[in-house]
């Protein structure tokens, strides 16, 4: 058995075959997503299907997060729309919502009382604790995507730590954090990118 | 319990549509306002119905915005006289799903789709690149903080340490192995049902 690779292998990215492929893929993603779909999206679309790189995933997730509305729904539309325009966005959206919605409504109609039972409550607690781990691990795995960030790893780690403290420990409202820390980070990135662009221009001329 | 009229349905639609545009950070962030609107202000759902709607949607797979579908379902079912109301009640329940889901999804989806198209067409603009570069470390930290908050909501160390341990073990397994996520969710549910966490 070959030794486990520590660096991501540079296999070429794939793309969805058709709108049906999008619909089926997102249906399957959504049906695996207990306690949140994001961890599944990262595992399936970045690691297994290789439809997008870690860097692209972080970029898309940033947009999905800052826009109003359900985040993973936004993300699925963005991914579908990239390959097949509006029909692709709708195919991904329909895949993400249709089957799970039928399932949850059946649950509501048939077993409304199950959710009140002690065993079901305890099972939910256990699944919730696992779901928390899935989300945290997804974040940890994406740290590697910051390697190529123009601001440099030091600044990135600083921004990540103050964001974690503000949200996780001080419990500041998300909107303030996005506007305050996020806004500051974007301004700083703009400055850095100005310098990068200026350097590139100088090299091109000289 | 007061039953919704056509004007009420329209009000429900516009209320959820405005919440759609305020839902930065996910639809679940608007749940407190939905509770105020549906239970306290209008009395279209009972307290117990609201709570169990959220619980059912968490037990099922899929995006957590689906709790809105269950709320709409129960509002419609109540409007038709509850489960004993026959096919009228079931039809109104489906209508409730339609009204609430379209309202919560349409405004934010149109906005997001338009904005991302624009950003993609202008991806070489320095402002667009600065946004992506600057936000990357923030959103990664937000994911880790979300995991932290979810497990930290159980805040009695003497009683809740098994839950914390389960979260920590899951984090390491997802990070370092390729084990299928469904196995972990299943194991968590089983440990919970057996009363071990």
Image (spheres, coloured by chain):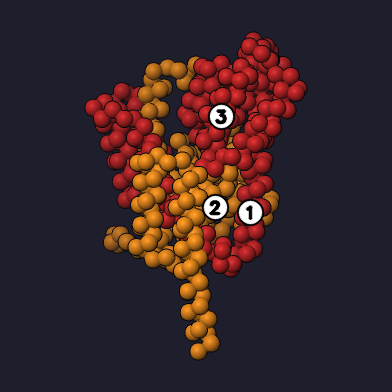
Q: Find chain B in the image and tell me its colour.
A: red
Above or below for A206 versus A157: below
What's the residue at 46%, 69% (across, down)? Answer: A192
Label 1 resides on the chain identified as B
Label 3 resides on the chain identified as B
The residue indicated by pointer 1 is: B115
Counting from the top left corner in percent of width and height, residue A7 is at 35, 63
Left of B37 or right of it: where is A176? left
Q: Are marks 2 and 3 on the same chain?
A: no
Counting from the top left corner in percent of width and height, residue B117 is at 65, 57
How far is mark 2 from mark 3, CA to CA? 24 Å
Which residue extends farthest right?
B6
Earlier in the chain: of badge 1 and badge 3, it is 3
The residue indicated by pointer 2 is: A63
Counting from the top left corner in percent of width and height, residue A129 is at 36, 34
**Nearer the camera: disc 1 or disc 3:** 3
Q: Are marks 1 and 3 on the same chain?
A: yes
**Chain colored orange:** A
């Amino acid at each position: 058995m070959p030794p486990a690779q520590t660096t991501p292998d540079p296999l070429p990215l794939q793309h969805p075959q058709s709108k049906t492929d999008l619909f089926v893929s997102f249906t399957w993603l959504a049906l695996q997503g207990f306690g949140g779909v994001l961890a599944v999206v990262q595992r399936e679309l970045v690691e297994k299907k290789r439809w997008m790189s870690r860097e692209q995933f972080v970029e898309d997730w940033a947009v999905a997060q800052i826009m109003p509305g359900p985040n993973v729904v936004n993300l699925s539309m963005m991914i579908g729309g990239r390959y097949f325009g509006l029909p692709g966005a709708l195919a991904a959206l329909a895949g993400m919502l249709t089957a799970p919605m039928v399932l949850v409504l059946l649950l509501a109609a048939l077993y409304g009382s199950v959710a009140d039972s002690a065993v079901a409550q305890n099972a939910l607690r256990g699944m919730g604790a696992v779901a928390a781990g899935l989300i945290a691990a997804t974040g940890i795995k994406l740290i590697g995507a910051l390697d190529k960030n123009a601001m440099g790893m030091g600044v990135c780690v600083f921004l990540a730590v103050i964001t974690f403290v503000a949200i996780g420990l001080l419990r500041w409202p998300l909107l303030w954090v996005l506007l305050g820390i996020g806004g500051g980070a974007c301004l700083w990135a703009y400055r850095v990118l100005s310098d990068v662009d200026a350097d590139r221009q100088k090299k091109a001329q000289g | 319990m007061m039953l919704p009229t056509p004007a009420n349905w329209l009000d429900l639609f516009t209320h959820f549509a405005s919440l759609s545009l305020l839902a930065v950070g996910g639809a679940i962030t608007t749940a407190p306002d939905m509770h105020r609107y549906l239970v306290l202000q209008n009395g279209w759902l009972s307290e117990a119905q609201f709570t169990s709607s959220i619980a059912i949607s968490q037990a099922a797979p899929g995006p957590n915005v689906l709790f809105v579908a269950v709320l709409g379902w129960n509002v419609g079912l109540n409007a038709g006289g509850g489960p004993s109301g026959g096919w009228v009640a079931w039809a109104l329940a489906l209508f409730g799903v339609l009204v609430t889901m379209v309202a919560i999804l349409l405004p934010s989806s149109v906005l997001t789709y338009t904005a991302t198209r624009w950003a993609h067409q202008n991806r070489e603009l320095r402002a667009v690149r600065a946004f992506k570069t600057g936000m990357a470390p923030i959103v990664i930290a937000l994911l880790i903080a979300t995991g932290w908050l979810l497990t930290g909501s159980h805040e009695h160390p003497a009683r809740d340490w098994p839950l914390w341990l389960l979260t920590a073990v899951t984090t390491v397994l997802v990070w370092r192995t390729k084990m299928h996520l469904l196995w972990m969710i299943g194991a968590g549910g089983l440990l919970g049902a057996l009363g071990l966490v």
